[in-house]
Image: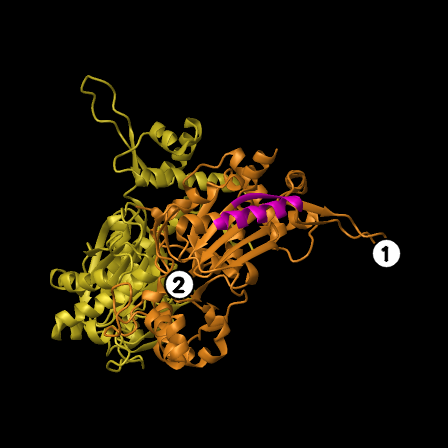
Chain colours: A yellow, B orange
C-alpha cells in the first residue's frame, strides 16, 4: 500500500540537509560544461550565497572541487573564479576479466581515464584463482600509478561476463566459472586487501560507461555483442538491474522458437543467430534476428534509443539497415516515433571504464561520507 | 553527466521539510495494518513526538486522518488512541471505456471502492463523442453518490484500451479511435467541467489496481488478456511507463517471426496466438506463445512475478502448465530462481479501480497541497 512514497522513507533532519546540499552543490558544478562561480552555483541551486560558500569551502578543502585562479587582468572587468571537479583526490579502480584479456583502469572524479592497463591472454585455462590473481596484480599497478598522481583510489569494481549475485559470480559460462567469490580472491592480494570491491555484469558496466561519456541520452538499451550477447538497460540515467540483478539477458531471448539448440538449454535464442560466430557466418540473418529481439524490447519498454557495443559497434554500418527494417515492421509505435539506433562511442574498454566510474560514483553521490572520512 | 543525482534536483528548505514530513506521517499511518498511536508514528518515522503531533493535527483537521476514540475503559490499562486514514474526505473517480462496456468507480483515501457503476453496450458504433458523453454522465452519477457520503472527488482518471500521449488517445484500435482528446470531451459535461482529468492505458491502470490490492509484491508484470493483450510493468511499487508512455505492448511482441499477419502490420505477434479469439480456438498453443513472450520479458528484465489478468485470470488453471513449461525452458535463470505466476486478484474491474486510486494518489503523495487547498 502506497509504495510510491519510497523517497519519503526517512525524516529530513539538519545533518541530512547538509549532506543533501553538499551533493547538490557538487552535482551542480559537475553538470556544468564550464568552470562555475559560487554565485552561479547559488543561482542554479536556489541556495543562498552564504550557504553555497560554506558548502564549497568544505568541498574544496576535502579535495572534491578545485577553485581556478582568475586569469591575469587584461583591463576590462574581472573574470569570475571558476569551480570545477577536482582532478586529484578520489578515484575509482575498474577491473575486467573477459575470455581473452584482463584490464585495469583508473577514473578520477571528473570521469577522465587516468591509467589503463591491458593483458591479452586466454583466461579460460587459468581458472578463477590464477586469473583473478593476475588481474589483482594489474589492479595493484594501476593503483600505484594513481597514487603517484596524487589520487586516492576509494574502491574497485570488477566487470565479468556472467550472472552476478551479492558479490558472487554465479555463472560465467564463456569462462567456465561457477560460484566464484571474486572480490574475496582479489582482496587476497596485499595491495588490494583494504579496498571495497564490488562485482557486476560487464554489459551493465559498459552501459554505465556509455552513459557517463554521452550524458545527453538518459534512457537507452546498450547491447554488447561478444561471444555471448548481453544488454544493459539505462532508464532516466539509472541502470535497471532487475529484481535479482539478472536483467539484460537479451542473448537468450527467443527469436525462432523452433530454432537450433542453445548452450543454455533452450532453442532459437538470439545468441544462435547474432553471437560473434554466427554473425561472422551470416550477417543479414544476424541483423534480422537482432531486429526481432530489439523490437520486443521496444514494444515492452518504449525505449527511445538502442546503442550497439562490442563487435556490433565495429559492424554497425553493415547491420543497421537489416535491424531498422525489423524495427519499422515490428514496433507498434514505429510510425509515431522511430527508435534511434547508434554505435557505442566507447570501444572495447566500455566495461572497465564504467567499472572504474562506478567505483568513484559513491563519492559524487554522497560527498559528506567522503569528507568525514578524509577529514 | 551524474544523472543519478536526480533526487537532489531541488534544495531542501523549511517548506519542503514540512511537506515531506506530512507525506511521511500520512504514509506511515497508511502502511500500518492497525490504527496507530501518535507515539508509534514518532517511533516509526524518527521524528519527535511534538513534530508528529503538529503534523497529525494538520492531517486530522484537513480530513486525511481520523483519530479513533479509545474504547470504554475496562479496568486494566488505557488503550492508545488510534490514527487511520480517513474514509471521508478526498476520493478519486475512475472512468473506463472498453469495447463492450463503460464503468465509473469512486475510491476513497483508504483504497476502498465506495461506488461502482457499469453500463454494458458495444461502444464502437457510438464514436468517441457519444461514448465519452455517456461515460461522463456515469461519472457524474458516481460523483454525486460520493458527495452524499461526504467525500470530495479530487480528480478523475480515464482508462482506455490504447496508446496515450499527453492527455490524447493516440490510437485505440479495438474501438476504432485515433487522436481523441478524451479529457476535453469529458469536461464538456457541466458536472465534470471543474475536475482535473487524466487518461492512461487500461493495462497500466489495472496493474496499479492490482498493486494497490495486493501490496506485498513490489515488482511484477501484469498481463491483461482481452481482444488485445496489454501489459503493465510495476517496478519497486512504481508503474514503468517508458519514454513516451507506450510501454507494455506485449501483444505485439513477435513469437513466430514468420507467423500470420497482425492488424498492426507485423507478423507472428503474440495477439495472433493468445488474443481472446485465438485462445478460444487453441488453448495449448496460446499458453506456449504466452510462455515464449513472457520468457523474453523475464530474460530482459528479471521480473520475479507475472500476474495474469482479464480473460487469462479466468483461464488460469488451464494455461498455467503450458506457460510454465516455456518459462522453465527459456528463462536463463529459471533454475536459480523460478518465476512466480499467478492469476490477478481483481477481476474485470481492475482498470477502473486502478484509475480511481490513481486519481486520489496525488493527495497521498503530497498532502500539503491538499491541505493548502482545503484550508
The residue carrying mark 1 is B76
Residue B230 numbered mark, or none: 2
The residue positioned farthest toward the right in the image shown: B75
Of residue A125 and residue B136, the one placed in the foreground of this image is B136
State the image coordinates of residue A30 (x, y, percent, origin top left).
31, 41
Query: Disc 2 sits on a residue from what chain?
Result: B
Query: Disc 1 sits on a residue from what chain?
Result: B
Residue drawn at point x = 23 percent, y = 61 percent: A327
Residue B160 picture quarter: bottom left
State the image coordinates of residue B49 (x, y, percent, origin top left).
67, 42
* Vertical comparison of A260 with A341: above or below: below
Q: Secondary structure at mark 2?
A: strand
Task: Let me know if residue B207 appears in the view.
Answer: yes
- CB-based contact (under 8 Å), mark 1 and mark 2: no
**Residue B152 shown left or right of residue A275 in the figure:** right
Boundaries of the magenta span? B134-155
The residue positioned farthest toward the top in the image shown: A75
State the image coordinates of residue A163 (x, y, percent, origin top left).
35, 70
Residue B235 picture quarter: bottom left
**Residue B292 shown left or right of residue B134 in the figure:** left
Amino acid at each position: 500500500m502506497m509504495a510510491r512514497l519510497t523517497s519519503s522513507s526517512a525524516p529530513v533532519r539538519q545533518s541530512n540537509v547538509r549532506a543533501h546540499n553538499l551533493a547538490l552543490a557538487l552535482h551542480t558544478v559537475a553538470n556544468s560544461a564550464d568552470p562555475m562561480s559560487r554565485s552561479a552555483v547559488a543561482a542554479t541551486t536556489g541556495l543562498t550565497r552564504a550557504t553555497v560558500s560554506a558548502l564549497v569551502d568544505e568541498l574544496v578543502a576535502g579535495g572534491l572541487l578545485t577553485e581556478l585562479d582568475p586569469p591575469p587582468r587584461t583591463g576590462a572587468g574581472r573574470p569570475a573564479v571558476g569551480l570545477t571537479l577536482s582532478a586529484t583526490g578520489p578515484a575509482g579502480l575498474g577491473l575486467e576479466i573477459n575470455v581473452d584479456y584482463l584490464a585495469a583502469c583508473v577514473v578520477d572524479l571528473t570521469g577522465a581515464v587516468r591509467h589503463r592497463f591491458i593483458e591479452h591472454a586466454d583466461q579460460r585455462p587459468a581458472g578463477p584463482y590464477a586469473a583473478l590473481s593476475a588481474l589483482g596484480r594489474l589492479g595493484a599497478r594501476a593503483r600505484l600509478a594513481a597514487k603517484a598522481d596524487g589520487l586516492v583510489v576509494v574502491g574497485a569494481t570488477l566487470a565479468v561476463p556472467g550472472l552476478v549475485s551479492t558479490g558472487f559470480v554465479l555463472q560465467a559460462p564463456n569462462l567456465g566459472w561457477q560460484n566464484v567469490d571474486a572480490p574475496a580472491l582479489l582482496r587476497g592480494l596485499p595491495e588490494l586487501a583494504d579496498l571495497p570491491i564490488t562485482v557486476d555484469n560487464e554489459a551493465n558496466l559498459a552501459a554505465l560507461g556509455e552513459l557517463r561519456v554521452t550524458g545527453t541520452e538518459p534512457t537507452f538499451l546498450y547491447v554488447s555483442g561478444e561471444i555471448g550477447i548481453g544488454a544493459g538497460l539505462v532508464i532516466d540515467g539509472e541502470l535497471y538491474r532487475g529484481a535479482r540483478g539478472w536483467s539484460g539477458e537479451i542473448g537468450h531471448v527467443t527469436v525462432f522458437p523452433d530454432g537450433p539448440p542453445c548452450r543454455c538449454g533452450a532453442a532459437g535464442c538470439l545468441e544462435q543467430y547474432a553471437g560473434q560466430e554466427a554473425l561472422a557466418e551470416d550477417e543479414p540473418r544476424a541483423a534480422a534476428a537482432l531486429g526481432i529481439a530489439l523490437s520486443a524490447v521496444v514494444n515492452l519498454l518504449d525505449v527511445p534509443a538502442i546503442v550497439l557495443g562490442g563487435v556490433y559497434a565495429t559492424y554497425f554500418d553493415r547491420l543497421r539497415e537489416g535491424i531498422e527494417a525489423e524495427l519499422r515492421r515490428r514496433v507498434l509505435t514505429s510510425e509515431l516515433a522511430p527508435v534511434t539506433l547508434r554505435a557505442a562511442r566507447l570501444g572495447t574498454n566500455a566495461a572497465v571504464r564504467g567499472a572504474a566510474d562506478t567505483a568513484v560514483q559513491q563519492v559524487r553521490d554522497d560527498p559528506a561520507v567522503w569528507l568525514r572520512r578524509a577529514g
